[in-house]
Amino acid sequence: MEGVLASFEMAGPARQAVHALKYRFVRALAPAMAPHLVCASSGHSFNAVFPVPLHRSREKSRGFNQAELLVQAAGWDAEPGLTRVRNTGRQVGMHERQRRANVAGAFRYAGRDLAGLRVALVDDVITTGATMQECAVLLRAAGAREVWGVAFARASYRVALPDAPIED
């Protein structure tokens, strides 16, 4: 991944917003959060936007994918083809190495050729970067020239991406 574009650190009101959207199912927050993703990614143009997928069982129990809600609320067209094929469970409390192992092989890409495209991977929050990095590998294999993580919030410590800047 080239880097991560995020509006807030995962603390205070940003943390409360993410938790309300994700765990209290307050879908109405997505339209209020989406402009911050647009702002964080200003100056970057993307040819394709992918919401980070949930496993179908998680999406069914939650009733929605928060990343998809954010993409829609931002006015971006969600690109199909990226899926989570293995239920990885919650990663809260896992360290970076555990998260990387947890998501290894959990995604598949069966979409269009991305040759030469600049791609955005969108999620509500990025913690270690393990999930987005796993997705980015697949999108690069499909030909993407660049893959950027775009999130409403990021963990307060450096996201572990090889030689990638964090831009706020």
Image (tube, rainbow, N blue to C red):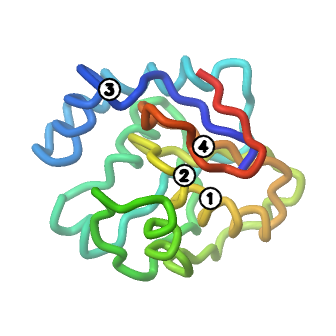
Callout 3: SS: helix
Residue 167's quadrant in the figure?
top right
Image label count: 4
Q: Locate residue 71 relative to residue 22 in the image: left or right.
A: right
Q: CA distance from mark 3 to mark 1?
A: 26 Å
Residue contact between numbered discs 4 and 2, judged by CB atoms under 8 Å: yes
Q: Is residue 99 above or below residue 9?
A: below
Label whose residue precedes the other's in the sequence (4 or 2): 2
Q: Quadrant of residue 40?
A: top right
State the residue position of label 2: 129
Determine which of the numbered discs, if any, sits on residue 133 in the image: 1
Q: Amino acid at mark 1?
A: Gln
Q: Which residue is mark 3?
A: 31
Residue placed furthest toward the right: 116
Percent position (x, y) of residue 131?
51, 60
Alpha-carbon neighbours of circle 2 within 10 Å: few (<14), some, or many (≥20)?
many
Residue ID for mark 4: 149
What residue type is disc 4 on? Answer: Gly
Q: Is residue 64 left or right of residue 47?
A: left
Q: Residues within 10 Å of mark 4 (few under 14, many from 20)?
A: many
Q: Amino acid at mark 2?
A: Gly
Alpha carbons under labels 3 and 4: distance apart: 19 Å
Q: Are marks 3 and 4 in contact (CB under 8 Å)?
A: no
| Closer mark to the observer between disc 3 and disc 4 | 4
**Image depth: mark 4 or mark 2 in front:** 2
